[in-house]
Every structure is written in C-alpha cells, then in structure tokens.
Amino acid sequence: MDLSYILNHLGEDRDQYFDAVTPPIIQSSNFTFKSVAHMREMLKSEMDYPLYTRGANPTVAILRKKLAALENAEDAWVFSSGSAAMTAAVMAQVESGDHIICIKNPYSWTKNLVEVLLAKFNVAFSFIDGTSVANFEAAIRPETKVILLESPNSITFEIQDLKAVASIARSKGITTIIDNSYCSPLYQKPLDMGIDIVMHTASKYLGGHSDMVAGCLMASKEHIHHIFKSEYMTLGATISPHDAWLMIRSLRTLPIRMERTLQSTSKVIDFIKDHPLVERLYYPFDEAFPQYELAKAQMDAAPGLFSILLRVDEVSQVEKFVDSLKLFILAVSWGGYESLVLPMCVTGDSENYQSEHKPFNLIRFSIGMDDADALIEDLKQAFGKIS
Ligand SMILES: *Cc1c(COP(=O)(O)O)cnc(C)c1O
C-alpha cells in the first residue's frame, strides 16, 4: 500500500459521515444499541465495535488502521501516551518469576517500568549493552520472556542488530518489543526484520506539533488482541477521540515534515561536525558513528535528533552556550515543529552534573521546521559566546 494512500484515505469511510472530507471527532464515551440481541452480539467484539470509548471509538478506529499499515502490521492499538503503550506491551508478556532483557540506557520511563514497577511483581531483569548480539545470547535464561529494544535510543543513539536479535529470540520463544520512535515508521520497519511488537510515542514525530501526548503499538492481530483484552482495558490509558483526530491530521504531513527534517538536519550536521568546539557527534548516519554500517543497513534515514559533546572544561560554559541559543528552545521532548536543545547537565545526579552515560558536556538537539541557515546562525553566535 502506498504511503499517501495510507495517510490520505485508508480507514476513512466518508459516506458514513455526510461525505465530509475530514473525519468527525466522535466525542462520545458511550454508544447505544437497537436491541438486546444486537447488544449481546456486539459485546463479543469490544475491540472492533463501538460500545464504550475505552474500547473501540470510530475516530480512533480510523487512526488504528493507518498506524498498522505504516508498520506493515496486521493490527495496532492507540494509547494515551507512549509510556502507557510500552507498559501494556511488556506487562502482557510476563508474570511473577519471569525475566526481561532490556538494552541499557533506554528511555527513562521504560527503565523505570523494568527496574521499579515490574520488579515489585518479582519480574527479574538484565540491562545489557545491546551493541553486541552476543550479549543478548549470554543474558538469556530459561525464564526470559521479553527482549526490550530501543534502536536507536534517543540520547546517544546506540543501535541493535534487529534481524540477529529477532532470530535468536524467535528460536527461544522470547517476545521482542522495540521502541521505534526515533526512526518513525517511515525510516525503519522492525516487524519486517522479525521483531514482534513495535511501540511509538506519538508525542514526537507522529504528532509533530507539540500539542498532544499519545502512543501506539503495532503487531500481529494475536498480540494486539492479547494486550487489549487484559492490560490495555485494565490500565485504561485511552486516547481521547480529539487527540486521535489531531494525530490523523498530523499524519497527513508526516512524510513532508520528515523530509524537511532530513534536509535541515543534514545541513546543520555538516556545519557542526567539524566545528572546533564539538568534541564528539552522536548521530547514526555520521560516518564516524561506531555503528554506522549497521545503521545504514537497517535504517532508511536518521532524522532530526542528535547529540554532541561540547569541547569545554566546565559546566558553566555549557550553561552559557545553551542560554545563548535563541532559536533552539530549551526543553525536553523532541520531534515537534520547534527546534530544541537539551543539555544533559540538567539531569546528571553526581558531581559536576554528570552521570556514567551522560557527561556534563553532552547536549541533545532536535531539529524542527525552522530554516536550517537560521539554525546554523544561531549555533554560530552561541559558539561565539564561549570561544
Ligand atoms: C517520549 C518518549 C517516550 C514516551 O512517550 P510519551 O508519549 O511521552 O509517554 C518513549 N520513548 C522515547 C524514545 C521517547 O522519546
């Protein structure tokens, strides 16, 4: 199915709603039935028939079809946040006594899910360096149920060999789950490489306008049904029909937003990578990136998120540099229209505001829809303040 068809038409049945071009926001929690027999019948398919909006909702159903198609998945489900989607996906696979393998340094709340929330229920875990396939093999135990991936991660961008890890997991009956948010569904298709469940935060590229928080899972019908039945309906992290509608609207422009992001990012990277005040660049499609070959083999592009080590001696110089930026807004998150800067010294917990994998001079950028030359000018003047 071609991408424009998915984004412009798939799932949209216009004669159901007055031939309106844009789908309606069915802002209703509840749905009524014509007869007891009809109601009894429909209660059997709560996932597909609108009955109550924590289950199926017609606006969300349109989105669900598009999201599944974007990842070449049989099915998808939408959540009120990326974190809720990840939690439901992982919890559906494990019970007390089981074991999870997770790459080290995943998204912070994924880490919390594994080492705090699931640990409370006696699910053991191993955080491993996912850059080597052998580390996965070594960590597998008889009770391992899940391998949790994030490729690349969103700060230092380490990647995992998805085909190799998927094939090891399949041979042992272990479910693989990946956070694919960085690449968006456009630039990496993990299900095609044998991964079982794909998760995205839609608060980043899929939403793209910094006006919503949402998440989704894409997988086989069997997996989605299993997750829906228990974890999703119990945890109840439902997307609102209005946010689903916003996301449908955002998806229309996903390809051109991503194209623009790629073009601008490549200009900014060209400027930044040989700059004397840049000690190191973290960007998967930079030739000097340690896993450049693997990145090229399994990703179609590396979008607008990258990090640098600023060549300075003191955290005060990092602060001066970041505070001098004008177009790059100081904030968490990424993937919106606005360009962002996030110095990791805001999160570091020990001396000099740094931790093991977050040196004090590590700074992450997200390239938005701003003019690339204007962004470069902004960086130039900020570098000027510390040189
Ligand atoms: C933001 C983010 C999440 C969590 O998504 P929410 O929608 O904020 O819950 C998960 N993974 C990555 C890589 C993220 O950047």
Image (cartoon, helix red, strand yellow):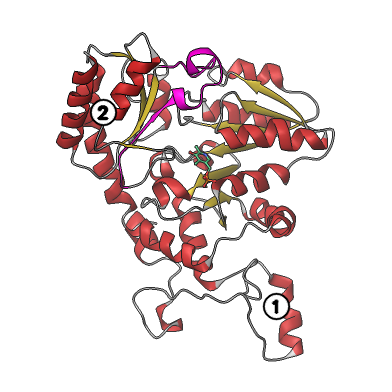
Is the CB atom of the residue marked by disc 1 within 8 angstroms of ligand 1's nearest atom?
no
Q: Which residue is depicted at the point 38% across and 40% down?
A: 187
Question: SS for tag 2?
Answer: helix
Whether residues under marks 1 and 2 lie with C-beta atoms below 8 angstroms apart, the answer is no
Q: Is residue 281 visible?
A: no
Residue 335 drawn in magenta: no
Image quarter hosting the N terminus: bottom left
Q: How far across and how far down the image is residue 134, in percent?
A: 61, 15
Residue type, numbered disc 2: Ser
| Residue at mark 1 to residue at mark 2: CA–CA distance | 59 Å
The residue identified by callout 2 is 324
Task: Identify which residue, 254 or 234, lies in the foreground.
Answer: 234
Q: Which residue is depicted at the point 36% across and 8% down?
A: 313
Q: How far across and how far down the image is residue 70, in percent?
A: 44, 52
Q: How far across and how far down the image is residue 26, in percent?
A: 51, 76
| 10 Å crowding of disc 2: few (<14), some (14-19), many (20+) | some
Question: SS for tag 1?
Answer: helix
Task: Identify which residue, 138 or 92, lies in the foreground.
Answer: 92
Residue type, numbered disc 1: Met
Q: How far across and how far down the image is residue 76, in percent?
A: 56, 55
Image quarter hosting the C terminus: top left
Q: Nearer the viewer, mark 1 or mark 2?
A: 2
Q: How many marks?
A: 2
The residue identified by callout 1 is 42
What are the residue bounds of the magenta stretch? 337-360
Residue 381 vs 24, above or below: the answer is above
Q: Quadrant of residue 111?
A: top right
Residue 352 drawn in magenta: yes
Q: Earlier in the sequence, mark 1 or mark 2?
A: 1
